């Protein structure tokens, strides 16, 4: 240690150190004594040859301080793909400060963060005696930010059948550092699933519903990779639509029913019709004309296969469905429909659009009066039944503006100028009045609506105007009076009370 003594006398003086009686001479008014052994207490006297001073106060020279232990590393965090800086943690010691730049600066915490790549020299110093410091044996290196070496190849498989959730994404990943983790997210960026990935081993996310997905592969350094095309769209195919009977149907004598089960083009469907387990057609359309058990198989391009079965019975009864209706009419102009089904039907039901613009009056199985309150094309049907047989006939009518209807080509004078059955209803006495614009031969036929039986037929020739009287010969019921010429046909509903 050392001590500074001041206030010394002028001239020559001698300083005596106790213990040891070691003397030092000089002439300055102050001096520094060095080389004092540590761990001792000293006093000093000064004399100028004739006078000696009293002893100074005690001067204590402390023992040599203990140097801090050599700093060691507790942990090093290297930069990653997600955090571009590193961190060093020095093993903690008591009573010291820490430095990673060889003592240029110190801090009380042994943790250093935000470190750029480079070499760092660790040093610790005593808080009580900052001159006491110890340097580490070796420097510590913070590496450069890693470059991702992860790669991934992936494909998606859409849903096979409508209503299921069997979509999947298959991928293979390689490269990177440490463990690879795959994360699948949906269109809302929500995590759907995660998987630990084995290098170069095919891995799959399965049971996926329809939607858009993204795939991310991450290694232990946080380095990531995505497939070249990273947006996978799992598509749910359109449903297979069965426009076929849901229960047993019955065909009357000579009756046929045609069905078209063509699916959307996107399904790329194939078709097979089986009758009593024998393949009868590979087309989407088929006409039923015979009894039997029918099975239809539809297979899509995604190998989704669905089957529909139904039975067809046969009847010896005869069924028909036919009605008269104008093909074009004006808005809010009454349109008369007449059931002229030429068979002994049991029921007849008019099939009308469920639209506010369509209204009706005088509806029964023999006819109906319609009124249309909006322009457009309307489909009208007549469904007839005999026993278990059913037959529906549809026709279209266009409701057009007056001027469009008037634009249709017209003859200068109507060919059929008059066709009247009067009185109607009647007790069986009625007249049929007919007038043409030219001399025309005509055939009048009366058919029973219920049985389809021809009740009367008359051929009239050589005139342009006819009046035919009918006396009671028809029983009570509903009939159709048919008019046939070489240029026109018409019908009139007749009721006999």
Image (tube, rainbow, N blue to C red):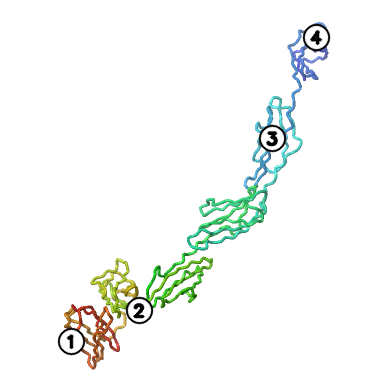
**Residue 244's image quarter?**
bottom left
Quick check: 290 above or below 184?
below
Label 3 neighbourhood size at 10 Å, few (<14), some (14-19), many (20+)? many
Residue 47 tag number:
4
Of callouts 3 and 4, the N-terminal one: 4
Please state the horizontal and vertical placement of residue 275, each as a whole percent of the image. Answer: 46, 74
Q: Nearer the viewer, residue 191 or 87?
A: 191
Q: In 3D space, how far apart are the residues under numbered discs 4 and 1 (Cα atoms)?
A: 177 Å
Q: Which residue is mark 1?
A: 469
**In terms of secondary structure, where does tag 1 sit?**
strand
Instruction: Choose between 168 and 328: the one closer to the eye.
Output: 168
| Image vertical order of residue 229 relative to residue 452, above or below | above
Which of the marked residues, 2 or 4, is nearer the chain's N terminus? Answer: 4
- Identify the residue shown where x is 50% and y is 61%: 236
The quadrant of the image that shows the N terminus is top right
The answer to whether the residues at label 2 and label 3 have Cβ atoms under 8 Å apart is no
Residue ID for mark 3: 90
Q: Nearer the viewer, mark 4 or mark 1?
A: 1
Decide which of tag 2 and tag 3 comes sooner along the chain: 3
> Marks 2/3: CA distance?
103 Å
Which residue, given by chain and number where applicable, does mark 2 sit on? 316
Q: For the C terminus, give its image quadrant.
A: bottom left
Q: Position of residue 317 (x, y in %)?
A: 33, 78
Crowd tier of the residue under label 2, counting other residues whose Cα lies within 10 Å: few below 14, some 14–19, many 20 or above: few
Circle nearer the viewer, 2 or 4: 2
Separation of marks 1 and 3 at Cα, in angstroms:
126 Å
The local secondary structure at tag 4 comes to: strand
Give coordinates of residue 31: x percent, y percent: 78, 17
């Amino acid at each position: 240690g050392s001590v500074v003594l001041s206030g010394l006398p002028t001239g020559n003086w001698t300083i005596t150190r106790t213990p040891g009686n070691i003397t030092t001479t000089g002439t300055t008014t102050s001096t520094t004594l060095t080389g004092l052994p540590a761990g001792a207490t000293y006093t000093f006297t000064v004399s100028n040859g004739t006078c000696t001073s009293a002893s100074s106060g005690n001067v204590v020279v402390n023992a040599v301080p203990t140097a801090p232990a050599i700093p060691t590393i507790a942990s090093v965090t290297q930069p990653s793909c997600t955090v571009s800086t590193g961190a060093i943690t020095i093993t903690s010691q008591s009573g010291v400060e820490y430095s990673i730049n060889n003592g240029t600066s110190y801090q009380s915490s042994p943790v250093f963060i935000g470190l750029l790549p480079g070499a760092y020299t660790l040093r610790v110093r005593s808080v009580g005696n900052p001159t006491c410091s110890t340097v580490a044996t070796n420097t510590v290196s913070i590496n450069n930010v890693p470059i991702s070496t992860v790669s991934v190849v992936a494909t998606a498989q859409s849903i096979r059948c409508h209503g299921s959730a069997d979509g999947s994404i298959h991928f293979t990943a390689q490269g990177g550092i440490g463990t690879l983790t795959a994360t699948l997210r949906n269109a809302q960026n929500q995590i759907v699933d995660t998987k630990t990935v084995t290098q170069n081993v095919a891995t799959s996310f399965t049971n996926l519903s329809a939607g858009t997905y993204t795939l991310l592969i991450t290694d232990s350094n946080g380095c990531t990779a995505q497939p070249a095309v990273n947006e996978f769209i799992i598509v749910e195919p359109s449903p297979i639509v069965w426009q076929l009977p849901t229960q047993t149907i019955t065909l009357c004598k000579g009756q046929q029913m045609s069905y078209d089960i063509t699916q959307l083009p996107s399904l790329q469907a194939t078709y097979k019709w089986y009758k009593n387990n024998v393949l009868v057609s590979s087309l989407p359309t088929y006409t039923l004309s015979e009894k039997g058990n029918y099975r239809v198989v539809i297979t899509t391009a995604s190998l989704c296969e669905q089957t529909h079965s139904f039975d067809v019975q046969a009847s010896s009864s005869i069924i028909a469905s036919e009605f008269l209706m104008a093909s074009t009419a004006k808005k809010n102009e009454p349109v008369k429909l007449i059931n002229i089904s030429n068979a002994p039907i049991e029921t007849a039901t008019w099939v009308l659009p469920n639209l506010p613009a369509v209204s009706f009056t005088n509806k029964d199985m023999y006819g109906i009066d319609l009124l249309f309150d909006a322009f457009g094309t309307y489909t009208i049907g007549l469904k007839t039944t005999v026993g278990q047989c059913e037959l529906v006939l549809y026709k279209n009518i266009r409701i057009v503006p007056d001027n469009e209807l008037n634009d249709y080509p017209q003859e200068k004078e109507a060919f059929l100028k008059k066709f009247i059955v009067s009185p109607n209803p009647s007790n069986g006495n009625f007249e049929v009045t007919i007038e043409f614009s030219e001399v025309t031969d005509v055939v009048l036929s009366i058919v029973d609506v219920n049985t389809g039986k021809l009740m009367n037929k008359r051929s009239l020739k050589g005139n342009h105007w006819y009046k035919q009287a009918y006396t009671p010969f028809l029983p009570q019921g509903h009939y159709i009076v048919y008019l046939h010429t070489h240029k026109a046909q018409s019908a009139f509903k007749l009721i006999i009370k």
